[in-house]
Image: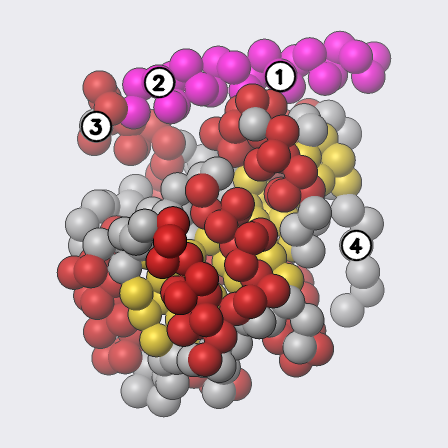
């Protein structure tokens, strides 16, 4: 695969890759034995990075950064970059589990509540009988337990680690314990466990295609999501227009 040049916009780096190109990149990481972190960015993550320098630094040092939100694809194109498509965290997660079953990679699931993570593991075992799951653990723990958890993940000999708790805790925790865990590929999956377990509902495909998943979630939970999606999207648009003006 010909390497594509990483771009920089709105304070974040971004790898302008398709899903297939991303999967090829992940396979190269897993087979190389490197310890790398993957992240996805969306409007909310851009806003977080602007407010949290530590999170911004960790994300920009990640080995692979995909555009999770359609807003990122639109913003990148508006700013003059060729970004082929969004590669959502949940879709990449599902594709990697499928590939793990084919390649013999061992995934570890970390995060959400105990019933949710168990439901996801059970679902994937039913979908992929050949999948060799290294282990799983819920995302509720005290900081003093972190080293023990990281060592348990290391001892599981996992090839992939899927982490399902919120930012920036997720990015900071992985940074602090990645060298202990020794997992070739670590990926944050956000609320993917809740969706796959049936706890939350993902937008229909046609809404996903037009880039309005955020609106679907806001309609489902208008009060809880108002600040995140309405106020957050306004702040994001302001950042895009500011960068456009500064470049003109």
Q: Position of residue 18 (x, y in %)?
A: 63, 55
Q: Residues within 10 Å of mark 4 (few under 14, many from 20)?
A: few
Q: Looking at the image, which residue sits at the far front? A: 144
What kind of element bears circle 2?
A: helix
Gap in angstroms between the C-alphas marked 1 and 3: 25 Å
Gap in angstroms between the C-alphas marked 2 and 3: 11 Å
Residue 156 is a magenta residue? no
The mark nearer the N terminus, 1 or 4, is 4
Gap in angstroms between the C-alphas marked 4 and 2: 35 Å
Gap in angstroms between the C-alphas marked 4 and 3: 38 Å
The image quarter containing residue 150 is bottom left
Residue at position x 58%, y 52% in the image: 175
Task: Give, as a single range, the part of the protein colored magenta.
Answer: 225-248
Pick whichever, 30 or 138, lies toward us.
138
Asked if labels 3 and 4 touch by Cβ distance under 8 angstroms, the answer is: no
The mark nearer the N terminus, 2 or 3, is 3
Q: Which residue is mark 3?
A: 221
Residue at position x 63%, y 29% in the image: 53
Compared to residue 98, the image places residue 62 above or below, namely: above
Q: Position of residue 66 (x, y in %)?
A: 60, 48
Q: Which residue is mark 4?
A: 4
The mark nearer the N terminus, 1 or 2, is 2
Residue at position x 68%, y 71% in the image: 34
User: In this rendering, would 139 be left or right of 23?
Assistant: left
Asked if labels 4 and 1 touch by Cβ distance under 8 angstroms, the answer is: no
Q: Main secondary structure of the magenta part?
A: helix
Pick whichever, 30 or 234, lies toward us.
30
Q: Which residue is mark 1?
A: 239
Q: Which residue is mark 2?
A: 227
Which one is closest to the eye, mark 4 or mark 2? 2
């Amino acid at each position: 695969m010909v390497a594509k040049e990483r771009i920089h916009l709105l304070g974040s780096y971004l790898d302008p890759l398709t899903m297939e190109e991303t999967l090829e990149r992940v396979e190269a990481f897993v087979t190389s034995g490197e310890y790398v972190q993957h992240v996805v960015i969306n409007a909310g993550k851009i806003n977080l990075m602007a407010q949290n320098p530590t999170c911004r630094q960790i994300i920009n040092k990640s080995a692979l950064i995909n555009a999770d939100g359609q807003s990122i694809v639109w913003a990148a194109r508006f700013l003059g970059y060729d970004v082929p498509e969004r590669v959502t965290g949940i879709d990449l997660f599902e594709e990697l589990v499928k590939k793990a079953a084919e390649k013999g990679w061992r995934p570890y699931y970390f995060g959400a509540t105990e019933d949710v993570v168990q439901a996801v593991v059970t679902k994937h075992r039913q979908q992929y009988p050949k999948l060799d799951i290294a282990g799983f653990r819920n995302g509720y723990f005290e900081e003093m337990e972190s080293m023990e958890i990281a060592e348990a993940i290391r001892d599981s000999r996992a090839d992939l680690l899927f982490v399902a708790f919120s930012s920036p805790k997720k990015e900071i925790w992985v940074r602090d314990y990645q060298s202990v865990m020794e997992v070739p590929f670590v990926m944050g999956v956000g609320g993917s466990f809740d969706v796959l377990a049936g706890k939350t509902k993902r937008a229909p495909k046609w809404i996903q295609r037009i880039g309005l998943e955020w609106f679907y979630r806001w309609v489902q939970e208008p009060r809880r999501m108002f600040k995140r999606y309405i106020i957050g999207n306004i702040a994001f648009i302001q950042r895009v227009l500011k960068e456009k003006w500064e470049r003109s």
